[in-house]
Amino acid sequence: MKEVKDTCDCRIIHDEKVKEARLSALDEKVTDDLCQTFKALGDPSRLRILWALEHQEMCVCDLAALLGITESAVSHQLRLLRTLRLVRNRREGTILYYRLADDHVSALVGIALEHVREPR
Amino acid sequence: MKEVKDTCDCRIIHDEKVKEARLSALDEKVTDDLCQTFKALGDPSRLRILWALEHQEMCVCDLAALLGITESAVSHQLRLLRTLRLVRNRREGTILYYRLADDHVSALVGIALEHVREPR
DNA sequence: TTTATATATGAACACATACTCATATAATAG
DNA sequence: CTATTATATGAGTATGTGTTCATATATAAA
């Protein structure tokens, strides 16, 4: 018969590294907010919307025509982007014109473009 | 009886805007690469891994201990990050030490942090 | 060789999510 | 008021994804 295993089989090779990582770790709320922001940019429809709004303000039905999806789908995505403060809108009659809320999206996309275009 | 509807009910209010957006649109391959990169950063486990590696190189089992998930899960995520050229590793005996591949991750996280910390 | 350790990989599953459709709301025109 | 248009919202659904478990591989030691 073999020895009884330790109940916790989490191996930690470098204890100090793990401790240090815990100390400098982001708190859960910030981690979650960051993830939501990156996740928002990680969907083709939303990224195309944001890219389009980087050049000009557009309304829901134009974006729907551009992407080839329903206006409902666009509206759902824009609500998410609004919640994350990535886009803003202004009303003109019944039409809502959407635009980027600040420069962060452009900056993020710029760096990511650098990365994916980097020769391997 | 009502009139028969147009078979295509895609409304386009601003035809020029849509045309211009099509012209300046990213091609599909680049869009997809960008999305994969952002999606990689949009998961809490992967983001915590990247954040930890920003401060020091770490091995799989240490990362597993840090995150409280299995080494298998960490390994799966690291493979994804490797594929996207976000992390690299070096072998020392049986241990693989992972580190960030370049400065893009730090830059991306930095800007995203600015965004989520911005007062609303 | 055999054994142990660190990591990788494939399958299965539970949960998340992006879409469409139907319906509701908001603003304007008549 | 009613009708129309632009957008928003809720439900349902098909697809995607992050995890664990079991197993395979790789390096080192005995």
Image (cartoon, coloured by chain):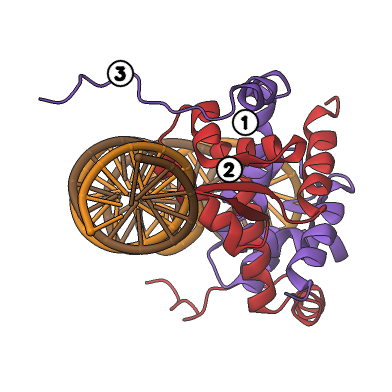
Chain colours: A purple, B red, C orange, D brown
Q: What secondary structure is found at the residue carrying circle 2?
A: helix
Looking at the picture, how far across and down is residue A99, in whole percent? 82, 53
Q: Nearer the viewer, residue A48 or A96?
A: A48
Give the percent coordinates (x, y) of residue A36. 63, 39
Residue topped by disc 1: A32
**How many neighbours does mark 3 have within 10 angstroms: few (below 14), some (14-19), or many (20 or more)?**
few
Q: Is residue A61 left or right of residue A85?
A: left
Q: Chain of mark 2?
A: B
Q: Is residue A38 visible?
A: yes
Residue appearing at x 82%, y 36% in the figure: B115
Q: Amino acid type of disc 2?
A: Arg
Q: Quadrant of residue C8?
A: bottom left
The circle on residue B46 is: 2
Q: Is residue A83 visible?
A: no
Residues tagged 3 and 2 counted as in contact (Cβ below 8 A): no
The kind of residue tagged 1 is Asp
Q: Position of residue A105 (x, y in %)?
A: 81, 51
Up-down relation of residue B1 to residue A14 (above or below): below
Cα separation between marks 3 and 2:
28 Å
Label 3 sits on what residue type? Answer: Asp
Is A58 located above or below residue B8 in the figure?
above
- Residue A25, image quadrant: top right
Q: Residue furthest left?
A: A1
Q: Of callouts 1 and 3, which one flags the residue occurring earlier in the amino acid sequence?
A: 3
The residue at 88%/45% (across/down) is A102
